[in-house]
Amino acid sequence: MKTHGPKNASWGRVFPAHAILLRGDITRQDTPAPMTFIDSWKIKHAPSIVAGVALLVTLGALAWAYIYTQRFVEQAQEVTSVVLALQAPRYLDTQLDLALLLSTEAYRMAPTEEARTTLQRVQNTNSGSNTNPYSHTSEVTCAPC
């Protein structure tokens, strides 16, 4: 008894395209597969998902840049504070007001150990001296015009 269909060896030789279709090796291209809800949701919301991921990446980069910049600014302020604090003792004997300004600004920039000790040293020197900067002037008289 002769069998017909894809199990017959001669069937594939006579009608190769039909044999492939019957075996299920390829699908027909003219009828698309029905779209599921998840597939339609992916197609509809894909641009929103891409935009959301891009936004998150951008925000992460901005946060990293802000943190890195803040760290750099703090280090620069500490270095400036130390430099000002180290310059203040030079003017203790000659310009006490400049020494006070330098030590105060050093402490305001960043309260480092150098700034604290310099500020205390300048204040202790200032407390022993006359605090009136105009004490060396004599009495001033105004002449009538």
Image: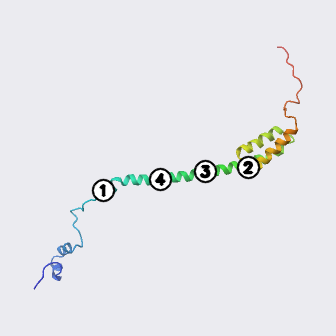
x then y, percent, for residue 34: 24, 60
For the residues marked 2 and 4, what is the alpha-carbon distance in whole angstroms?
A: 38 Å
Closer to the eye: label 2 or 3: 2
Q: The residue under label 2 is which amino acid type?
A: Thr
Q: Earlier in the sequence, mark 1 or mark 3?
A: 1
For the residues marked 1 and 2, what is the alpha-carbon distance in whole angstroms?
A: 62 Å
Question: What label sits on residue 40 in the rendered view?
Answer: 1
Mark 3, secondary structure of its residue: helix
x then y, percent, for residue 69: 61, 50
Pick the front one: 107 or 81: 107
Question: What label sits on residue 69 in the rendered view?
Answer: 3
Q: Is residue 58 above or below residue 125?
A: below
Q: Residues within 10 Å of mark 3 (few under 14, many from 20)?
A: few
x then y, percent, for residue 1: 10, 85
Closer to the eye: label 4 or 3: 4
Q: The residue under label 3 is which amino acid type?
A: Thr
Instruction: Determine the residue positioned at 81% across, 37% down.
Output: 97
Question: What label sits on residue 112 in the rendered view?
Answer: 2
For the residues marked 2 and 3, what is the alpha-carbon distance in whole angstroms?
A: 20 Å
Instruction: Determine the residue positioned at 18% across, 73% down.
Output: 22
Residue picked out by circle 4: 56
